[in-house]
Image (tube, coloured by chain):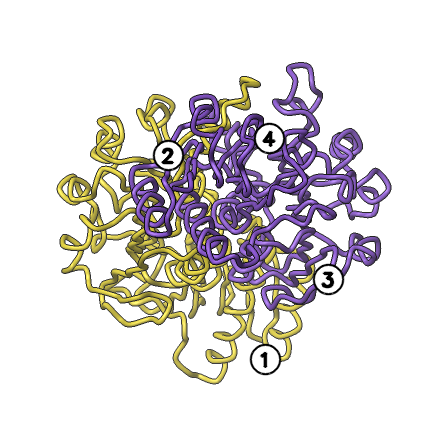
Chain colours: A purple, B yellow
Amino acid sequence: MRKLTVCCYGLEERHRDKLRARAEELGYTPCFHPSYHEAQADLRDSEVILGCEVQALEHAEKCRWFCSSSAGVEGHLASPFLKEDVILTNSSGAYGTTISEHILMVTLMLLRRQMEYTQIVAEHRWERALKVRSIHGSRILLLGTGDIGHETAVRLRAFHPDSIIGVSRTGRADTAFDRVYTTESLDTLLPDTDILVMSLPGGEGTRQIMDARRIALLPKQAMVINVGRGSTIDQEALLLALKEERLAGAALDVFETEPVPAEDPAWDTPNLLITPHCSGNVSLGYTVDRIVDLFLEDLERYTRGEKLAHAVDRTHGY
Amino acid sequence: MRKLTVCCYGLEERHRDKLRARAEELGYTPCFHPSYHEAQADLRDSEVILGCEVQALEHAEKCRWFCSSSAGVEGHLASPFLKEDVILTNSSGAYGTTISEHILMVTLMLLRRQMEYTQIVAEHRWERALKVRSIHGSRILLLGTGDIGHETAVRLRAFHPDSIIGVSRTGRADTAFDRVYTTESLDTLLPDTDILVMSLPGGEGTRQIMDARRIALLPKQAMVINVGRGSTIDQEALLLALKEERLAGAALDVFETEPVPAEDPAWDTPNLLITPHCSGNVSLGYTVDRIVDLFLEDLERYTRGEKLAHAVDRTHGY
């Protein structure tokens, strides 16, 4: 029998049941472990692995296909444990729902000055006339038009923004956006942006794509939201722009260094809403439903010897 | 010339310009004041008044039509200053955009445990695996299907909830909802509700419509959001249900007594997100755009001697 090991946290009984039933139908012997630590013995002779961490591959000599339960896999690609001849897939497509909800939440919190209202209420004060803003009529730029960007655009549309523009490497069209441009157009788009939402993968191709020069192209009322990777923004330049009120606000879920160090100036930057990289964790059962479904779709393809739908392009890193 | 007095806060120059131009075209002499205090001399001989406060009517003997810039006018109806023969209109239709954005924000904050994350970040901790929930798949009940309920349903739909049910006095159908029921069905609907959103007007007809008995019909995982009037919930029963974890959370923007008194137990109730009645204030320019446009539409009707679209039904209070 071909062995299939699942070493992922966040799985509930219904997820294990579904994986077990379909894997057995397709001719695999499935085993389950909460992480790669406990899975060592099974990993040695597993052909297929669904896992959170690339360390699962360290002694997995028989592995032909590793499916990461994450969407971002730049850490996997940089790891010596990932051999050239192992197929790598990711779980892009599982996180759009939960991360787009995070994006809508923090966007509204910034526009409606909820951090200040939280402070007002904490002090039992009754101050209610802070000048707020709306998604209605805002010009929104989504840098990154994958699953997260798409699901965010779909939700934003219901709030009647002035415009929803996408920017991606390829500029591939998507009807959720008014228009999608390639990265080459970024400099001309930034000055007309009220809300910039970034959901880019990590890696060299996106490193500090929002550098100090581009941050300075944004207008004073602009707000920046980043849920992709901390490496895609010059964090120091962003914090300085907030401090000098050259930007109206920012919400960061990802950082150059995580956890954010105790002495990091981010903690005390005005109008910066920090969340601890929680926008896309697997504590939402629906996210795990999607990880399981996407994996099982590829498991059928793999078993039939077909190309996998979620195979990572090692050149672009996603 | 017929005099028209505007005594409203929140107006910007563009609002005054638009009101002035159209009022003059229609044969009125418009005057502007930030509140009724400064407007006394002009109010005495004004035929039409657009105002925030019913006190503007105290000495306005010539007034034939008072348009409130608020949506809720139960205070106006209870006031001795509002004579029987004065037409009262409200600005229902101006607040749907801003209040629906507030509702989406607090709903997501409750589901994603943002109050706890705020505390985690305030302590510079890096804890990121709190179990969260999603609008996706949630069963939503909107008690109140006016402008606010409608705009909220439109936005919620983009998040793929399991269902969006409306409840109103009349049960009038609206395609933004899967179905709209009359208040008679409330008891049977509450046990199947994950998220209850209340946007009801005040007055006797809605007083404590969510009383202790009905609060107890909600399941343990339910969350309650109220942006209408504090009088529509038995606040003490709600706080107790939160304390005893018979409800998962609540977000209140309106209260039985406002400002919430210093010693009120609300301030220290777990899983209660308090905002200081700020969901629908006029600090959003777009809200004032709408107040002005709705008023001018009725001003044309009034001048032609037609029935006003926003006339308040004194029996139902809205």
Residues marked 1 and 2 touching at CB (< 8 Å): no
Judged from the image, the secondary structure of the residue bearing numbered disc 1 is loop
Question: Which numbered circle lies on residue A31?
Answer: 2
Alpha carbon separation for disc pair 2 and 3: 41 Å
**Would residue B195 be found to the left or right of residue B12 on screen?**
left
Q: Position of residue B295 (x, y in %)?
A: 51, 69
- Can I make out residue B89 in this image? yes
**Tag 1 residue:** B26
Residue kind at label 1, given as amino acid type: Leu
Alpha carbon separation for disc pair 4 and 1: 52 Å
**Tag 4 residue:** A274
Residue kind at label 2, given as amino acid type: Cys
At 32% from the left and 25% from the top, the residue drawn is B264
Disc on the earlier residue, 2 or 3? 2
Dot 2 and dot 3 within a common chain: yes
**Would residue A65 be found to the left or right of residue B179 on screen?**
right
**Tag 3 residue:** A171
Residues marked 4 and 1 touching at CB (< 8 Å): no
